[in-house]
Image (cartoon, coloured by chain):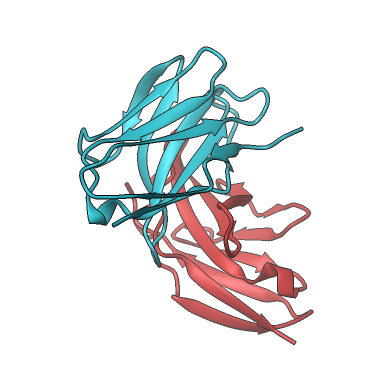
Amino acid sequence: DAKTTQPNSMESNEEEPVHLPCNHSTISGTDYIHWYRQLPSQGPEYVIHGLTSNVNNRMASLAIAEDRKSSTLILHRATLRDAAVYYCILRHTGTASKLTFGTGTRLQVTL
Amino acid sequence: DAGVTQSPTHLIKTRGQQVTLRCSPKSGHDTVSWYQQALGQGPQFIFQYYEEEERQRGNFPDRFSGHQFPNYSSELNVNALLLGDSALYLCASSLRSPSYNEQFFGPGTRLTVL
């Protein structure tokens, strides 16, 4: 499985944008970039995914570098409820293949 | 619509015992995956079931086994428990369809081995 690298932790103030980076220099052409987050005492939850183009949904935006070797998850206005561990995962296209989690980025949001 | 449910919530066992954890997938989902999450780590893939068969397996010993029932629910069995098996066990459900990308996770079962 291709590897991802994320900072261990980041901090943000409430209502400010947050940019969570992820490096994946060994990504293959058939790997999708997925982001999940895990709130305290809960299972992970899907945030967003993309292949080549930038993606937006109600939770976040995903910006993918032109060479696909890095990506950035953007939370437009962080709230206290966004405090979680954010995982960047490469997933092979096709059937419901496994998710390979790293250690993720722990996001702290303060008032 | 109930999401993924798991039982029990917490469990305490002693070394050498056996344990069975249960998972009901989100309505309409046909594929169940199990993950082990040690404290401070990301979840690690154990195995995945579809059509009542194990389809993919992670790097776990055969003390870890599973089953999927015709109603798509699933069990995870762990034999000869070790202290290192203490972890949060997560179940995730999805659809087998290649166009379906999202996995839904349950809240997990916290297993403590003494």
Q: Which tint is chain A?
A: red
The reply, left or right, for residue A13 in relation to residue B8 is right
- Residue drawn at x 29%, y 39% as measured from the top left: B58
Chain ID, cyan in image: B
Image coords of residue A90 (percent x, y): 44, 49
Q: Nearer the viewer, residue B16 or A71?
A: B16
Q: Quadrant of residue B78?
A: top left
Q: Quadrant of the N terminus of chain B?
A: top right
> Is B16 on the left-hand or right-hand side of A2?
left
User: Relative to A5, is B63 above or below?
Assistant: above
Residue B111 % position (x, y): 40, 51
Placement of B25 over or under B12, stated as above or below: above
Residue at 58% x, 43% y: name it.
Answer: B106
**Left or right: B7 in relation to B40:** right
Residue at 54 percent across and 20 percent down: it is B72
Say if residue A24 shows up in the picture: yes
Residue A37: x and y in percent read 58, 58
Which residue is at the front of the view, B46 or B6? B6
Give coordinates of residue B37: x percent, y percent: 40, 54
- Is A72 on the left or on the right of B41, as rendered? right
Q: Is residue A95 visible?
A: no
Q: How many marks?
A: 0
A24 and A20: which is toward the camera? A20
Nearest to the observer: residue B103 or residue A75: B103
| Above-or-below relation of A21 to B35 | below
Q: Quadrant of residue A111?
A: bottom right
Quadrant where the image shows the C terminus of chain B = bottom left
Q: Measured along the vertical axis of the image, is residue B25 above or below residue A57?
A: above
